[in-house]
Image (tube, rainbow, N blue to C red):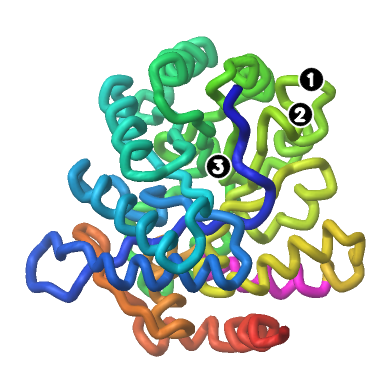
Amino acid sequence: MPSPPPSGIYVPVPTFFAPSSSAAPPLDLSSQAKHAVHLAKCGIRGLVLLGSTGEAIMITNTERKGLIGHVRQELKNAGYPDFPLIAGTYTQGIEDTITQLDDAKTAGAQWGLVLAPGYFAPTLSQQGIVDWYTAIADNSSLPILMYARAFWPGAHKSVAASVLEERAQTPLCSPEADDFIILHASTFARLSAHPNIVGAKLSHGDLSLHAQLGSSPLQSLSSSSFATFTGLGQQLLPVLTVGCAGAIDGLAAIFPRTMVKLYNLVKEGDLHEARRIQEVVARGEGLVVAGGVVGVKEGVKRMLGMDSETRLPLQKGLSDDEWAKWDGVMGELQALEDLR
């Protein structure tokens, strides 16, 4: 029987691209591996490769296999041979999704993170979602986690300063947003009974759903069978208290030790100190909410010194004026990061 990923903090790592005048700059596998090993050394429990933050939709299947395989080999060379790797999928066709999962296993991933199909969101039924995930789980060589993400109105706009400000104030779940899919608690419960479905990532602010999954009395949703992760580090403390496994969190790509420390404090029962750090983390997560992939890459560049291009249609980087809005909280987080 497949097991879920172990509890803890996971990083949905950005994909590193080398400088290039091309509209599709090549992968920078050296920087990719350097970042992965850094995260492992900082106590991160595992990585999500080629998820939303990894610009998966911009990457070919051949590049996917090469990236996963290179990261696996470099982690092994650094002394982390069995480091947990979860590979994202971005396709909505069943056959293509299964191909990506099988390729990921061959390259060295242990789990797949399968994004819920959103192209026909307005007409999808819960039964259609159940049937789609079941068909994939029946045929995947990797155990899978379901991925339910939030979509923001205006998500296709640039991240100019005014938009960063606007999106930072946008509710994390909006029924008016394009391609928004609501997966009911009963849908997760039904799918959790499948032996090859071992968890979920919930990238939205619905704490009720986290509680219903994390605290469920159902055996199929117990922590030994099904791991529920939040995709939002700003709610790590509350979701851990209702039985969730941890977070798959973009800010951890920049400040891994801080997120691991917050996780450990909650697990150790030091809620006073956990609340103090959670408040700072919640403010810092505004960069991830507002800037998405671009915000995470900017933070990795400015705080860790690891630069990367993006692929079109994404535009690289924030101006110094835009970044200045985050200087204060980034400094607070760096002070936490530097504590040992």
Identify which amino acid the numbered label 1 is placed on.
Leu
Element under disc 2: loop
Q: Which label is found at residue 275?
A: none
**Where are the magenta residues, as a range?**
276-289
Name the residue: 16% across, 63% down. 26
- In this rendering, the answer to whether 280 lies above or below 107 is below
Give the residue at mark 2. 222
Q: Locate residue 15: give its quadrant.
A: bottom left
Left or right position of 229 against 32: right
Count neighbours of disc 3 (C-alpha within 10 A) and say few if under 14, some if 14 to 19, many if 20 or more: some
Count neighbours of disc 2 (C-alpha within 10 A) and say few if under 14, some if 14 to 19, many if 20 or more: some
Name the residue: 33% across, 51% down. 68
Q: Which is more N-terminal, label 3 or label 2? A: 3
On the image, the x and y values in percent for residue 160 come to: 36, 72
Separation of marks 2 and 3 at Cα, in angstroms:
29 Å
Count neighbours of disc 1 (C-alpha within 10 A) and say few if under 14, some if 14 to 19, many if 20 or more: few
